[in-house]
């Protein structure tokens, strides 16, 4: 009866009567050789790793969270992010103590989405991991446009000088890992890393759930 009033469908493929189906869960599962090293058009100067292409169930889930308010899909995305994080720790790409810094988002977008979904994914992914914490250290200044549809050069101009350290940030001896839901050109990651380094942070890499 509830499905007739509030239709329930999978956030990855639209299958009825389930929030997240087994087939989409398999698509999002982190394989033994993942995350993969990628080469975004803008080189941020640190390793950038991604859990998969921005396509299929991965893309649909990210869009559903950000644009359609599907907060229930933060959990499966966080499960994938945690698996990728554990892999990087095992491989020695990052060490502990580790501080995870979510990529910044526009305040207007965060308000519209009921909070910053990347930060919520990071907090869920890091929960219970020893010597791993999450710090919302970055924010975007005003006048940053939505990057959808912008060229690589336009994306760089859009964020240049507009990523700012939050007031409560303190220089840490820890490794810092920047996390994001999707890396497209690498412009936001590059500017984020530049600002963190100026603040004295040691940025070990970037981990994204998806790359375009």
Image (tube, rainbow, N blue to C red):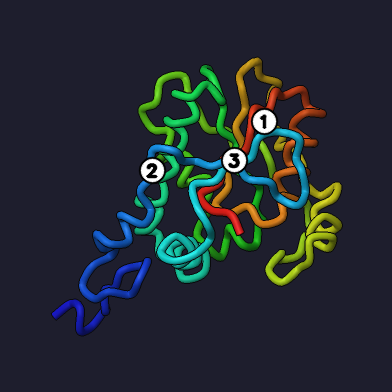
Marks 1/2: CA distance? 37 Å
**Residue at position x 76%, y 35% in the image:** 45
**Residue at position x 63%, y 33% in the image:** 205
Rendered location of residue 206, percent (x, y): 62, 38
Rendered location of residue 187, percent (x, y): 75, 51
Give neighbour class at mark 2: few <14, some 14-19, many 20+ (Cα, 10 Å). Answer: some
Which residue is under mark 2?
31
* Callout 2 touching callout 3 (CB < 8 Å): no
The residue positioned farthest toward the bottom in the image shown: 4
**Does residue 14 lie above or below 184 as drawn?**
below
**Disc marking residue 37:** 3
Give neighbour class at mark 1: few <14, some 14-19, many 20+ (Cα, 10 Å). Answer: few
Marks 3/1: CA distance? 31 Å
Front in this rendered view, residue 118 or 2: 118
Front in this rendered view, residue 109 or 91: 91
Which residue is under mark 1?
168
Rendered location of residue 188, percent (x, y): 72, 49
**Residue at position x 77%, y 49% in the image:** 42
Front in this rendered view, residue 101 or 90: 90
For marks 3 and 1, the one nearer the N-term is: 3
Task: Locate residue 34 relative to residue 2 in the image: left or right.
Answer: right
* Callout 3 touching callout 1 (CB < 8 Å): no
Give neighbour class at mark 3: few <14, some 14-19, many 20+ (Cα, 10 Å). Answer: few
Find numbered disc 1 in the image and state the secondary structure of the residue it sits on: loop
Q: Quadrant of the N terminus?
A: bottom left
Rendered location of residue 77, percent (x, y): 41, 51
Q: Quadrant of residue 23?
A: bottom left
Q: Is label 1 or label 2 in front?
A: 2
């Amino acid at each position: 009866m509830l499905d007739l009033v509030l239709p329930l469908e999978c956030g990855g493929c639209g299958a009825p009567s389930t929030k997240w189906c087994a087939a989409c869960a398999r698509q999002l599962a982190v394989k033994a050789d993942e995350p993969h090293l990628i080469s975004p058009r803008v080189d941020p100067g640190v390793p950038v790793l991604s859990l998969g292409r921005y396509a299929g169930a991965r893309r649909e889930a990210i869009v559903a969270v950000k644009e359609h308010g599907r907060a229930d899909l933060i959990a499966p995305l966080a499960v994938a992010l945690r698996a990728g994080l554990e892999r990087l720790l095992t491989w020695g790409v990052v060490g502990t103590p580790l501080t995870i810094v979510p990529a910044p988002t526009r305040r207007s977008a965060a308000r519209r989405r009921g909070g910053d979904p990347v930060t919520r994914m990071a907090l869920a992914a890091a929960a219970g991991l020893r010597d791993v914490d999450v710090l919302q250290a970055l924010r975007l200044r005003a006048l940053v446009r939505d990057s959808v549809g912008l060229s690589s050069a336009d994306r760089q101009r859009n964020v240049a000088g507009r990523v700012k350290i939050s007031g409560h940030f303190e220089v840490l001896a820890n490794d810092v890992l920047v996390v994001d839901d999707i890396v497209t050109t690498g412009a936001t990651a590059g500017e984020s890393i530049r600002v963190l380094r100026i603040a004295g942070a040691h940025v070990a890499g970037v981990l994204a759930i998806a790359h375009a």
